[in-house]
Image (cartoon, rainbow, N blue to C red):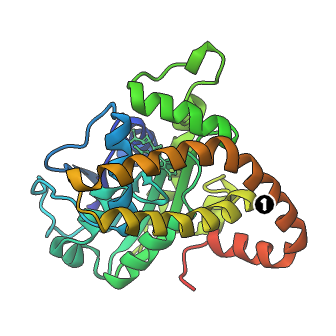
Amino acid sequence: MKKILVLYYSQTGQLTRIIDNLLKPVRRIPEVSVVLEELQPEPPYPFPWSAYRFCDVFPESVAGTPCKLRPPVCDLDDDYDLIILAYTVWYLAPSIPVNAFLHTPEAGRLFRNRPVVTVIGCRNMWLLAQERVKRIIADLGGRLTGNIVFTDRTNNLIGVLTIAAWMLTGRKERFLKVFPLPGISEEDIEAAQRFGTPLASSLAGEAFALDQGLLNDLGALRVKPSLLIMEKRVSKVFDIWSRFIRLKGGPGAASRRKRVRAFMVYLIAAVVLLAPLASVAAAVLKVLKREKIRAEVEYFSQNALR
Ligand SMILES: Cc1cc2nc3c(=O)[nH]c(=O)nc-3n(C[C@H](O)[C@H](O)[C@H](O)COP(=O)(O)O)c2cc1C
């Protein structure tokens, strides 16, 4: 009997549905058992978000500051053959609850010498979050063997607007009735099943082996040069804002309200004014630094660390 442990955190259930579909082919195999562990922040994060709370989680997301989690329900000391870590991205970083789990002593015991597959469900910017996750898994002694990424299909600017409307209203509908539906498309969520088959066959052998190249052939991930350039730029600005706000206090502190609000204004301005400019700058850089960018795309399409 082979055992898979799936660790996940999903607010709207979008990522949960992706995992459910992905695991369908695995669940058909009687020799494989699947244990699901939903990470539960204590207290829970709100959904829908108020604009303020949405921005107040920014500094700690970027800084990688853990939140409190409820004790896990499953037995983390069981002998798992594979760990699937399914996470969403908050401000270019793994969501706070997932990051919090990765910093627990239990995670240290759990990941050591075990194969890990990451499943990401986010808007479209996951590269730097995965870099952090790669590093943590390596530090914990785990072996990252696969990465499967699901993103919104719409363009960056429209995606920001539609996801913000969804997160702030809690309603997954077409913003102003003219924009596309927010989030990962139903077809993509349904088609997550195609990854279950290679996952299941990798479990059949003695040692778990999964080929990222094969997953990539199935469309597991796509590194877009323009988003890669944008993420790298934005993350530098995010680091500065995060430090600037944290100097005034921790999550929810009244003393940092002004700075959180200033960040909110920056975020709106960045989306409306800077994002289109950044897209143009990225298009120019793509031409000027073609070779370097090609090497970067290759790097982010695989699981080893630099
Ligand atoms: C506070 C917050 C910040 C987010 N930041 C990003 C981001 O930087 N990049 C991205 O691609 N998606 C971002 N998202 C979207 C999430 O990754 C995810 O797609 C969305 O929250 C739905 O996931 P879930 O309902 O399965 O939790 C953010 C969402 C939240 C709530």
- Look at 47% across and 69% down and name the residue there: 239
Count of marks placed on residues: 1
Mark 1 is surrounded, within 10 Å at the Cα level, by few (under 14), some (14 to 19) or many (20 or more) other residues, namely some
- The quadrant of the rendering that contains the C terminus is bottom right
* Residue nearest the observer in this picture, 208 or 131: 131
Q: Is 27 rendered above or below residue 5?
A: above
Locate residue 3: give its quadrant.
Answer: bottom left
Judged from this view, the residue extending furthest toward the right is 287
Report x, y in % for residue 52: 34, 40
* Residue nearest the observer in this picture, 265 or 221: 265
Q: Is mark 1 within 8 Å of ligand 1?
A: no
* Residue nearest the observer in this picture, 304 or 213: 304
Report x, y in % for residue 176: 58, 16
Report x, y in % for residue 180: 63, 24
* Residue type pointed to by label 1: Ala
Q: Is residue 6 visible?
A: no
- The quadrant of the rendering that contains the N terminus is bottom left
| Residue designated by label 1 | 282
Q: Is residue 255 visible?
A: yes
Q: Is 291 rendered above or below residue 151?
A: below
Q: Is 258 rendered above or below residue 106?
A: above
- Look at 21% across and 50% down and name the residue there: 254
